[in-house]
Image (cartoon, rainbow, N blue to C red):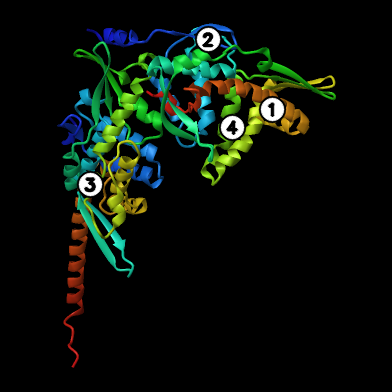
Amino acid sequence: MSSEAVLQKILDLQAKNISVFVPSQNRNIEFKPLNIRQQKDIIKSSLDKNIPGISLNTVLNDIITENCVEKNINFLVFDRLNVAFNLRKNIFGDKIKLTKVNEETGDDEDTNVFGSLEQHLTSLNLIANPDIISKNITVDTLKIEVKTPTLSTDNKANKEAQKNLSHLLEKDNGIKDIISELFVYELTKFIDSITVGEDKLNFRELTISQQIKAIETLPANVNKEIMNFVEKVRDYEKQYQVFKVNGKDFNVTIDASFFSSE
Amino acid sequence: MDSFYINLYVPSLDKKLRFKEFNNLLLINVLKFITNKDSKGFSNYIDYVIDKNLLDREYKDSFDCFDKLIIMLQYKAVNINQELKFVIKNEDKKEASLSYNLFNIIKEITEKNFITKTEIELNNSVYIGLSIPKSLYIENFDTIFSECLMYIRHGEDRVYLNSLPLDEKNKVLDSISGDNLNKVISFFDTSNNSTKNAAFMSENTKLPELNTLKVNFFNNSLISFLELVYHENLLSYFEFIYVMVNKVKLKLDEFYNLVPSESLLLYNMFKKDVEEQNKEIEQIGKKDKGPTIAKP
């Protein structure tokens, strides 16, 4: 057997594509399964000097874009978990270990309870209503257009946050500082434009630091309105993480360990 | 054949291969990398030295980081100095010395059963060969991952991933299902456990810091140990070159082509000559002055 034939043998190993419902497109789309290089990137996202949550999201966003068989689809951030759950199920199986929130500390704690990803996803209402896709906020002469960010907008802000905030990980209580700083980065993802009178500021044309400066000038009541929209989107995403087992709520922790067996 | 070759043991092949000797030019570059604290550069230079000096070319891509460590330790022992000496000042400011024989260190660590390679089955009798990293310098997790996947095997046929163009290598990696990473990580754990508590040097009480130097293929402990073994004052080395060129009258090229232990041998002969000449001059001086008169 020639080396070409050996190579062909391994190329033939590539598993079949999977069909996944994508809420923002309201239809099923084909995805290639997770490969070993992507699995490595997922694990790497949990290593030192990475801000764990945003690093993992950046990696997942890249994987979703790369593995989608159709090109030029504008995925939105709330598509991420359904695709991720299905990619995980395809490689590591349906069974998943669940956690429970400790009421005193608020941390997720291990349990010996397992859930079925298939049953869980079937029980959810995956349709994305228009009120979590975009909204216009008007306060006096100020008009803010908010939109659920695409994966590429999410990545741009995440990478900037990673670059500017990762040094805080080395400080005592650095995580607290990161969380408060991330709040502003989060807003940059959702604001699409700000219009004052006739002047329109298109956020997607600005750098992240320019976006942050613009947000800092917004009145508090406008920020509150924006946050209401962000919370609606996050509530939609939260449903993926809450499993009902025997009438009780359990959580699934989405970190690097989620992408391994059980 | 225009050079002298020495046989150096390569653990992963369990055999000796022929290498050119390690000369002063190579040593001076090594000292510069160490003085600059450039571990990555030092590691790349070791790759260059091993590749350039290897006579048995068919093995040129087959060395892992442990092979490279052992080759460099043998070079130090054979071509430079087999004694690894540490001089320390105690609390009472008295000097104490501690020395190890490099051949003993090499013997001890090569006799340990470290796990440095394995094979995992992917599917349909297709196997992937895994090894510890090839590089002595580990930059990040990507280095470990990209270097541990060595070859794909089906039956007796193997394709080495390093021999493939990058896009073809990526195609192969993209074809391997993500769940296999658990098997790869399990190999890292097994290999790591096999080196657990394996010290480079036997335990001592004079310099306890040395007891903490442990063999580990997945951090930078191998390159750090080589930096310690090869460490020498660069300025003193330049002074040595000055003497060899200006006093011993070697041409710079001739000096660079010599093996360090040979140049030290020549220097010692020169030094002995000078000492004998001084003695003769002293004797003549004494004769010229005539007999000294003993004081009453």
Q: Which mark, by number, is residue B211?
A: none
Q: What residue type is labelled 4?
A: Ala
The disc numbered 4 marks a residue on which chain? A
Observer-side mark, 2 or 4, equals 2
Residue located 30% across and 29% down the image:
B186
Badge 1 marks a residue whose secondary structure is: helix
Q: Which amino acid does label 3 sit on?
A: Ile
Where is mark 3, residue-wise? Answer: B80
Instruction: Tell me the distance, in whole angstroms, between the alpha carbons under discs 1 and 4.
Output: 19 Å
Where is mark 2, residue-wise? Answer: A21
Q: Are marks 1 and 2 in contact (CB under 8 Å)?
A: no
Where residue B48 sits, quadrant-wise, is: top left
Instruction: Tell me the distance, in whole angstroms, between the alpha carbons under discs 3 and 1.
Output: 69 Å
Residue located 59% across and 35% down the image:
A164
Observer-side mark, 3 or 2, equals 2
The spot of residue A203 in percent (x, y) is 70, 22
The disc numbered 3 marks a residue on which chain? B
Q: What residue type is labelled 1?
A: Met
The disc numbered 1 marks a residue on which chain? A
Where is mark 1, residue-wise? Answer: A227
